[in-house]
Image (tube, helix red, strand yellow):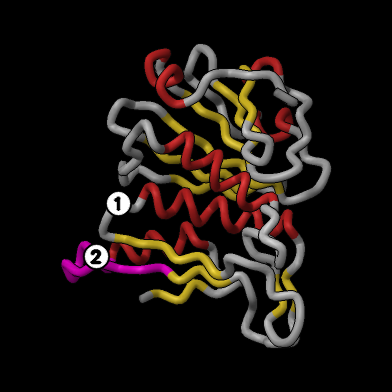
């Protein structure tokens, strides 16, 4: 069991867990904490929590069956020690993190993203995590580091090779062609998907925002 503290990045922890599995031939489990080490701290920023959850889901999917991930917390803890938001509030209404997990599961279920060719790019605009599958498709998770970062700001750092890459708004669960979304402001985790036509058809169908 690997305890992933609030100041640790889930993708980095997953890389360490995979190295452990390779060296020792044992399974590993990441326990990804939402709260910090101090019981007096509060973590109720859905934007920051969404980024952490999205990175955790990507780490889980791309690490193979030998690495499991446990997310803390499912439901809000809004009083007492270690106050933090979960995937649902105390009335079990879904928070943005719930929609993000739903969208990511929809993207990943049609393909096996188990390649070990994972890359992480940290810039002043965003943290970008990339995974590949055996078919050569690439998926980039975009985590903006400010509130006014547009897709145009990030794509200069991320040249794409596919003819028609897709932009996926994870919270809304909508997709559009990347060329139609250069001025999209990243209000939460998003994905750019570079995939062959047959993969695009099996993973998700393009739609317009708001549908």
Quadrant where the image shows the N terminus: bottom left
The residue positioned 62% from the left and 84% from the top of the image is: 37
Instruction: Using residue 72 as the reference point, say whether residue 114 is left or right of it.
Output: left
Q: Nearer the viewer, residue 102 or 93?
A: 93
The residue positioned 48% from the left and 20% from the top of the image is: 161
Q: Which residue is mark 1?
A: 64
Q: Nearer the viewer, residue 142 or 92?
A: 92
Q: Residue furthest front?
A: 91
Q: Position of residue 156 (x, y in %)?
A: 65, 29
Q: What element does badge 2 sit on? A: helix
The residue positioned 64% from the left and 44% from the top of the image is: 189
Say if mark 2 contacts mark 1, CB within 8 Å.
Answer: yes
Residue 56, placed above or below residue 102: below
The residue positioned 68% from the left and 35% from the top of the image is: 172
Is residue 26 highlighted in magenta? Answer: yes
Q: Please state which of the two labelled residues, at mark 2 or mark 1, is closer to the viewer.
A: 1
Cα separation, mark 2 vs mark 1, equals 10 Å
Is residue 207 highlighted in magenta? Answer: no
Instruction: Using residue 131 as the reference point, say whether residue 8 is left or right of it.
Output: right
Q: Position of residue 165 (x, y in %)?
A: 54, 20
Q: Which residue is mark 2?
A: 21
Q: Nearer the viewer, residue 90 or 197?
A: 90
Q: What element does badge 1 sit on? A: loop
Task: Please tell me which of labels 2 and 1 falls first in the chain.
Answer: 2
Q: Nearer the viewer, residue 1 or 121?
A: 1
Residue 83, placed above or below residue 188: below
- Magenta-tinted stretch: 20-30
Q: Callout 2: few (<14), some (14-19), or many (20+) C-alpha neighbours within 10 Å?
A: some
Query: Quadrant of residue 103 in the image?
Result: top right
């Amino acid at each position: 069991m690997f305890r992933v503290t609030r100041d640790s990045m889930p993708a980095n922890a997953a890389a360490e867990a995979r190295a452990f599995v390779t060296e020792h031939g044992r399974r590993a489990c990441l326990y990804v904490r939402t709260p910090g080490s101090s019981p007096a701290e509060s973590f109720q920023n859905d934007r920051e929590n969404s980024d952490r959850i999205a990175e955790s889901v990507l780490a889980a999917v791309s690490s193979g069956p030998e690495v499991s991930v446990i997310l803390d917390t499912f439901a809000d803890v809004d009083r007492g020690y270690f106050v933090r938001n979960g995937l649902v509030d105390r009335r079990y209404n879904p928070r943005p993190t719930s929609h993000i997990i739903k969208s990511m599961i929809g993207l990943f279920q049609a393909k096996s993203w188990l390649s070990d060719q994972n890359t992480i790019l940290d810039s002043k605009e965003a943290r970008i995590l990339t995974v590949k599958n055996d078919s050569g498709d690439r998926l980039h998770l975009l985590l903006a580091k400010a509130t006014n970062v547009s897709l145009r700001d990030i794509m200069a750092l991320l040249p794409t090779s596919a003819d028609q890459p897709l932009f996926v708004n994870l919270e809304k669960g909508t997709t559009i062609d990347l060329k139609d979304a250069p001025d999209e402001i990243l209000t939460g985790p998003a994905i750019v998907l570079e995939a062959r036509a047959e993969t695009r058809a099996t993973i998700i169908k393009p739609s317009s925002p708001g549908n």
